[in-house]
Amino acid sequence: MFHYLICSTARVGSNLLCSLLNGTRVVGHPQEFFCPFTVADLGPKLCGLDSVTNTDELHRFIDAAAATYSSQGRFGIKAHYLQLQAALQAGYDLEGRFPDRFVHVNRADVLGQAMSYVRASQTGAWTAQKQERCEHRFQPELIRATIQRLNAENHAWEVLFQRYDVEPYRLSYERLCADFEGELARLLAHLDVDPTTVDVAGAVARATKHFKTQRDAVSAEWRERYLEWVKRRAQLQHDSFAARHAASASVTSPAVSAA
C-alpha cells in the first residue's frame, strides 16, 4: 500500500488539507491515527481497542485504520511531531513501515499561528464554526512560549528529514489558502496521482464549503499589542544591560589621583 505522512504543527490548516485530500476519494482519509483520542474514538470499531498499550496493539490499530481509511491503495497519516515521537517510544516501526512520501505543512506567519493556538486553547473554538465558550485574554508571554514551541517542533521535523535523508513536499498554509485547487493538484502529483483524472474542483468545493478563516479584529489587535510588547521588552533588556555594564565599569575603573 502507498503510504504517506503529513508532518504538521498545530494551526497550520492540516485538518483542512486532510479534508481536501479525502474529498478527492483517491488518497484515503488521512487523520491523526497516532493520537490517543483518535484511537479511543475509532479503535473499538476498527479492531476492538480503545487504547494501545504495546507495540503489537499500535501496529494492529494502524493496520486496521489503513484497511478502512485508504482508497485506491493509498493511505495517509497526519501527525504532529510529539504524536509521532510518542508512537516511536511505544515501538512503532517507522523504518519497517517507512512512508513512500512525506508532506511537511507549515505556516510562514508563526506569530499568527501562535496567536491562533493560544486563543483557541482559551476559548475552545478550534474552528470558525465553533462558538467561543470562554473569554479570550491577551497573554504575550504565552504567545512567545508558543512561538518557541512551534519553532522547536518544526526544527524536530527537519532533524527527522535529515536523519532519514528525505526531502518532503513542502506546503504552506498561506499558499494553500491562496490557491486551493492548484496546491491540491500539485500535491496529488507528488502522491503519484494524475490530477487530471481527479475532480479537484469538486474536492475543493466539498472541503471548503464551510471554510472560514478565524482572523478578525481581535487577531489584528493582538498582533499590534504583541509587537509593541516585544519592542518594550527588548528596550527594557537593553536598558538593564546598559545599567549593569555602567555599574560594573564604575567599580573596576581605577581611581584618579589628585594632582
Image (tube, helix red, strand yellow):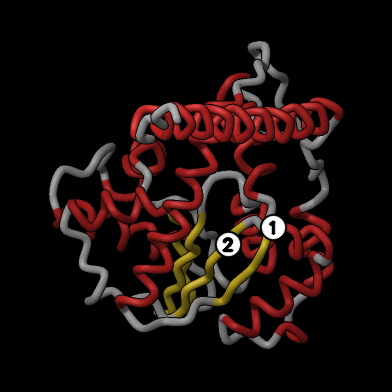
Could you tell me if residue 73 is visible in this image?
no
- 134 and 74: which one is in front? 134
Position above or below: 32 against 235: below
Label disc, if present, on residue 105 of the rendered structure: 2
Residue, far front? 259
- 80 and 223: which one is in front? 223
Q: Amino acid at mark 2?
A: Val
**Residue that appears at 39% across and 54% down:** 81
**Residue that appears at 75% across and 34% down:** 223
Residue 97 position within the rendered picture, expressed as x and y whole percent measured from the top left: 28, 74
**Residue that appears at 45% across and 43% down:** 149
Residue 40 left/right relative to 152: left
- How crowded pointer 2 is (Cα within 10 Å; few <14, some 14-19, many 20+) is rated as many
- How crowded pointer 1 is (Cα within 10 Å; few <14, some 14-19, many 20+) is rated as some
Report which quarter residue 189 is drawn in: bottom right
Residue 159 position within the rendered picture, expressed as x and y whole percent measured from the top left: 36, 68
Residue 74 position within the rendered picture, expressed as x and y whole percent measured from the top left: 49, 75
Disc 2 and disc 1 in contact, CB within 8 angstroms: yes
Which element is circle 2 on? strand
**Residue that appears at 73% across and 77% down:** 185
Residue 14 left/right relative to 158: right
Q: Amino acid at mark 1?
A: Tyr
Marks 2/1: CA–CA distance: 7 Å
Name the quarter where the C terminus is drawn.
top left
Report which quarter residue 256 is drawn in: top left
Name the quarter where the N terminus is drawn.
bottom left
Could you tell me if residue 160 is visible in this image?
yes
Q: Circle 1 sits on which residue?
A: 173
